[in-house]
Image (cartoon, rainbow, N blue to C red):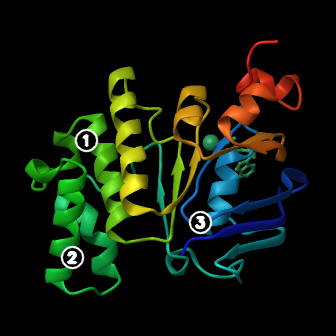
Amino acid sequence: MGQLKLENACKSFGTVDVIRDVNLDVQDGEFCVFVGPSGCGKSTLLRMIAGLEDISSGDILIDGQVVNAVPPSQREIAMVFQSYALYPHLNVRDNMGLGLKQAGHPKAQIAEAVKRAGDMLDLAKYLDRRPGELSGGQRQRVAIGRAIVRKPKLFLFDEPLSNLDAALRVQTRIEIANLHRELGATMVYVTHDQVEAMTLADRIVVLRDGRIEQVGAPMELYNNPANEFVAGFIGSPK
Ligand code: ADP
Ligand code: MG
């Protein structure tokens, strides 16, 4: 299970309202993409879901349980960042296995989980290398692998492809789509790339100034954008 619900979610930094009354239901197994201009609150919303930022008011529910006060490590969520956030001194195997090791899992179980993720992401040959010895695309696959081994209910991706060149972006995007199919996990994915949103999403959430402007299936938004703003992101030219 990995059902996510946001109820009247708000976030302020000081007197600045960054997330304003967001209501959203993400179904178990759904691929939900957040789009919107820089500064509209996409990363903040993801960080609130992950528990890396406190919610100012409203509720975040996972599988029906309010998790507002649950620490990140206990939310069964894995987050993949634009910047990979790998440990440079650890090899690929240890980077991927670290979360399980810290959670006290037995060595054999960690090795098995890392092997499976490595095979899935075509990293089997690189398990003994350090991040500095890998390409950007391989590093991002390690970061994705690290998320997979923890078997989270919910994957959060914050513009994971934006540091990759065009060809790798396409390839990694396809891998993420395959992963979603194989794992059947719920994924919430932030991007400002229209093609990524259109090809990956079951539903797209368009954000503007911390509010939801429109939610719908890609073709729904494409054909029937609620306004010029949505049309500018997703819609067909009018
Ligand atoms: P996005 O990811 O859509 O580009 P962010 O969620 O990073 O947007 O930021 C949304 C707004 O919140 C921006 O105006 C940003 O300056 C502000 N913001 C984000 N984090 C903080 C913080 N820790 N303190 C103060 N303001 C913040
Ligand atoms: Mg951001």
> Which circle's residue, 2 or 3, is located before the other in the chain?
3
State the separation of the CA atoms marked 2 and 3.
23 Å
Disc 3 marks which residue?
50
Direction from residue 236 to residue 90 in the image, left or right: left
Check if mark 1's residue and mark 2's residue have beta carbons within 8 Å: no
Q: Residue at x 47, y 32 (%)?
A: 162
In the rendered view, tell whether residue 8 sits above or below residue 19: below
- Give how far apart the Cα atoms at labels 1 and 2 are: 20 Å
Q: Of the numbered discs in the image, which one, if any, rests on residue 138?
A: 1
Q: Which numbered dot is residue 106?
A: none
Q: Amino acid at mark 3?
A: Ala
Question: Which residue position is annotated with label 2?
Answer: 110
Query: What amino acid does circle 1 point to?
Result: Gln
User: Can you give x and y, in whole percent of width and height, for residue 150 in the image?
Assistant: 37, 72
- For label 3, the crowd category at 10 Å Cα-Cα, with few meaning under 14, some 14 to 19 and many 20 or more, is many
Residue 89 visible in the snapshot: no
Q: Amino acid at mark 2?
A: Ile
Seen in the picture, residue 70 relative to 24 is either above or below; the reply is below
Find ligand 2 in the image and state its quadrant: top right
Residue at x 13%, y 82% (from the top left corner): 108
Nearer-N-terminus badge (1/3): 3
**Residue visible at 68% across and 32% down?**
219
